Image (tube, rainbow, N blue to C red):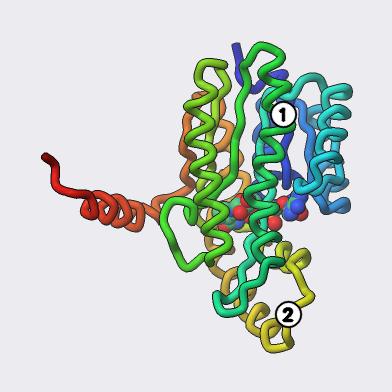
Amino acid sequence: MDRVDGKTAFITGGARGIGLGIARAFARAGAKLALADIDQASLATAKSELSDLTPVETFLLDVRDRSAYARVADETESRLGSVSILCNNAGVAGDQHVTRLTYEYWDWVIGINLTGVINGVQTFLPRMLKRGGGGHIVNTASGAGLAATSSGLLYTTSKFAVVGLSESLRLALEPFKIGVSVLCPGPVNTKIISNSNDTRPSSSVTVEETKMWEAAITQANAFLAAGADPNEVGEMVLAAVKTDRLYIHTDRIMAGLIEARAKALLDAMPPAK
Ligand code: NAI
């Protein structure tokens, strides 16, 4: 039986960027779509584009809001049928210099990038299990979740956790025939840096920090602009769901760092007895 055609996919952060790329790939493969995002205008644009291909419902949802998440899940399933593909993709790429960290910053990044994923799992997994299993969960982490990079402390922390959650969830869900994949992209050509800037905590930001942030945005945007096309990433996710693969890489940019990390871990172990 086809794992995508005729199924309902719920995609967070589905209005723009990688989430929209995933939505396009799934729509072409015959899935019905529920897109959740905090950006209403982009949701409307995505809906008008994709409705030509497949039934699409859109929801204004902050993935941190658990009760709203449950309501949206009910509405999705009553309009489109049971969700059997869940893509926990919404995320922000923002950080703060290590000397200026605040709880507000930790809560912002961890709340969306990690707790948002947990909320998606906790909303839809019991429903999948109650129906007797089957389905697939895709969590969007990052290459930054596989080895520490200059991507920043908050981002790296959140993405390592999403990788660990996904690996463990895959083992736990094997008996229930629910697949789990973790998307670990290298640079992808999206506006994540400026989009994230729109929602970052502003209360403790100085004029100097704003200037630094603007400079960082320009630099990071240029780096991402040379990255993968989000539509191609969507096709990679579709292929991984169809074949039930755990890791989804978009390039080999992290290969050296992953190798060095694995070697450092192994070298730190006591000698074999
Ligand atoms: P994007 O900014 O184009 O898309 C993210 C979407 O998530 C946006 O539409 C945004 O409105 C939505 N969003 C943000 N906070 C939300 C919240 N609290 N609740 C619901 N929706 C929310 O960014 P992009 O690049 O498509 O990012 C998608 C995922 O891919 C993120 O998890 C990001 O960390 C990850 N990623 C992106 C990379 C890149 O180079 N663009 C590289 C590695 C990982």
Q: Is residue 185 above or below residue 235?
A: below
In the visual, does 128 lie left or right of 233? right
Residue 2 seen in this snapshot: yes
| Amino acid identity at mark 1 | Phe
In the visual, does 10 lie left or right of 234? right
Residue drawn at the location 71% of the way across and 15% of the way down? 130
Which label is found at residue 83? none
**Quick one: which residue is furthest to the left in this view?**
273
| Amino acid identity at mark 2 | Val
Tell me the distance, in whole angstroms, between the alpha carbons under discs 2 and 1.
Answer: 37 Å
Q: Quadrant of residue 231?
A: top right
Q: Quadrant of residue 10?
A: top right
Q: Residues within 10 Å of mark 1 (few under 14, many from 20)?
A: many
In the visual, does 119 lie left or right of 68? left
Residue that numbered label 1 is attached to? 124
Residue drawn at the location 83% of the way across and 46% of the way down? 43
Q: Earlier in the sequence, mark 2 or mark 1?
A: 1
Residue that numbered label 2 is attached to? 205
Q: Residues within 10 Å of mark 2 (few under 14, many from 20)?
A: few
Q: Are marks 2 and 1 in contact (CB under 8 Å)?
A: no
Numbered disc 1: secondary structure: helix
Q: Which is nearer the eye, 64 or 136? A: 64
Name the spot of residue 121 as percent of width and height, x first: 67, 34
Q: Quadrant of residue 218?
A: bottom right
Residue drawn at the location 32% of the way across and 55% of the way down? 261
